[in-house]
Image (spheres, helix red, strand yellow):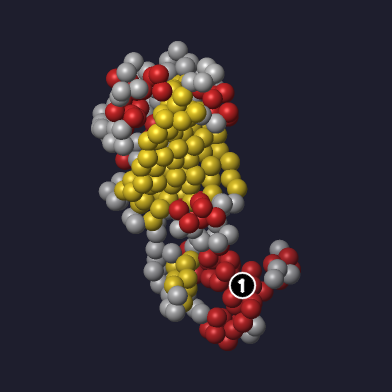
Amino acid sequence: MAATDDRRPKYQRIADSLREAIRSGEYGPGDRLPGENDLMATHGVARMTARQALGVLRDEGIAEARKGAGVFVRAFRPIRRHGIQRLARDQWGNGRSIWSADIENRELVVDQVSVSEEAAPERVGAVLDLADGEMTCVRRRRFVLDGKPVLLATSYLPMPLVSGSAITQEETGPGGTYARLAELGYEPTHFREEIRSRMPSKDEMTQLSMAAGTPVVLICRTAFTDQGRPVEVNEMTLDAASYVLEYDFDASTTPDVTS
């Protein structure tokens, strides 16, 4: 094992040692990491090697560069996204945001909201089983936690189901979209989430204020009524460095995601 580690590039070994120092608490959130000159002197490497080592930590979202000040341990605490508990009816059915299962007392702001009536993309129309020409209500949002953009979300709902309701307004009210769907007689009782990952587009990097080299996690959630009717498709783009995805369920054949 030691021989294998020794064959790793020097910059990777330096990055590993810095990462371990962060995990052990030697460097805490907001602390300045050794600079390029420090790493060159300590490890006897060229400036490019030291720069690459710090770049690894930045790309992983562990550290962030501050112009003219150096590289610092990232102070933002990742969100532990409880993929099942957050969708329980006890959340939105009692007027709480589904985010309340994830963020405790942290400050969440939806700083960009737009609502429009649009034809759904073909992939969404197929999932919602839309008739030819049937329009959707499209809700686009950006979520900012503790001052850091963390999520872009676009929801599609069949317009005939939600026309005239608060779902077509920027502010949907207590419990959000799912509580309003329940009031309309289309209560979501089952959810399906599909998860993928890729590198972000330039626009996504800008909107989420992401460090170069950080991937995004794509979650597509479909909400169904107890009759199996799909009533919403929500396409989400997450900054991978800002999240821990947690799924906690019993070892049954078909876990009940609504309880």
**Residue positioned 29% across, 51% down in the render:** 107
At which x and y percent is residue 236?
Answer: 48, 40
Q: Residue furthest front?
A: 133
Q: Nearer the viewer, residue 39 or 199?
A: 199
Q: Nearer the viewer, residue 150 or 15?
A: 150
At which x and y percent is residue 254?
Answer: 52, 22
At which x and y percent is residue 71?
Answer: 47, 73
Image check: 193 left or right of 150? Answer: right
Inspect this view and state whether residue 255 appears.
yes
Image check: 115 left or right of 53? Answer: left
Image quadrant where one finds the C terminus: top left
Q: Nearer the viewer, residue 136 or 22?
A: 136
**Element type at marker 1?**
helix
Inspect this view and state whether residue 108 appears.
no
**Residue positioned 48% across, 20% down in the render:** 134
- How many badges with numbers are in the image? 1
**Residue positioned 37% across, 40% down in the render:** 114
Q: Residue furthest top?
A: 227
Image quadrant where one finds the N terminus: bottom right
At which x and y percent is residue 108?
Answer: 31, 48
Q: Nearer the viewer, residue 91 or 140?
A: 140
Q: Which residue is mark 1?
A: 52
Image check: 220 left or right of 99? Answer: right
Image check: 205 left or right of 92? Answer: right
Does 136 appear above or below 202? above
Residue type indicated by callout 1:
Gln
Residue 169 quadrant:
top left
Q: Residues within 10 Å of mark 1 (few under 14, many from 20)?
A: some
**Residue positioned 43% across, 47% down in the render:** 151
Does 114 appear above or below 126? below
